[in-house]
Amino acid sequence: QQSSRELFSLITEGIILTDPEGKIMEMNDQARSIFQIPSDNEDMHIDAILSRDILNDQSEKEHFLYIDKISKTVLLSRAELKEERLTIGILILVRDITEKKKMEDEILKERANEDVNKTKSNFIINLSHDLKDPLNNIIGISRMLLTYGYENLTSKQVEGVKVITESGNRFLYLINNILEFSEIETGRTKVNPETFHINELISIIQSLFSSLVKEKALLFSSIVTKNPNPL
């Protein structure tokens, strides 16, 4: 018995040895730690910590435990100890896989989030393409009216067509930006870092938003140091 205890103590996983009826004959420190059982508690039955079904269950199964307000997931497997074809004991191997299950759950959640984001991005991409075709037609027709039908339009109609053209171009610009970001998220587009001058970027932004700023009677200004280093 002393040699079996020494052997059990060397095993890194929990070991429980019971008689055929389920009375615990031996338990190593690892098993006591998993089930929070004091070392002086010797007289126990398997029912106190696990379902009695484990004595007859040949398969390896996961079990969810709730001990001292702490949830644990353990993997249990059993083997019968026989002597002259008679079962003299049950050896139960207990492996604490709580952290492993948490990591698996986190990975599953991350994959689910990735799938949701890809589905959303694919939807936006398809929707953007569906919007671009009729929008390009509207912009094309408005430009034709300004170019070839200018003499047949009143000044008020000309202003209206200009508004249609400008709004269409602005909307098309936004759609292209959304489409570009969505394609980056789905891995369809690779980001190629390049050096650029911040003054040029701010100048482009100002030109893009200048008409909108005037319409809203807003003030848009920027302050940049002279000859900044390229980014």
Image (cartoon, rainbow, N blue to C red):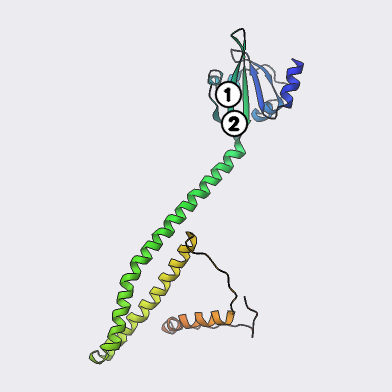
Secondary structure beneath dot 2 equals strand
Name which quarter of the figure residue 81 lies in.
top right
User: Distance between the Cα atoms at labels 2 and 1?
Assistant: 11 Å
Q: In the image, 182: left or right of 66?
A: left
Q: Please provide percent x and percent y for residue 101.
A: 57, 39
Q: Which residue is mark 2?
A: 74
Mark 1, residue position: 50
Q: Residue furthest left?
A: 152
92 is higher (above) or lower (below) than 198: above
Q: Amino acid at mark 2?
A: Val
For the N terminus, the image quarter is: top right
The structure residue drawn at horizontal position 27% and vertical position 86%, both measured from the top left corner, is: 157
- Residue 116 is situated, as x and y percent measured from the top left of the image, at 45, 53
Viewer-side residue, 154 vs 76: 76
Q: Residue furthest top?
A: 84
Q: Nearer the viewer, residue 128 or 84?
A: 84
* Residue 151: x %, y % from top left: 25, 92
- Residue drawn 46% across and 63% down? 183
Which quadrant is the C terminus positioned in? Answer: bottom right
Badge nearest the viewer, 2 or 1: 2
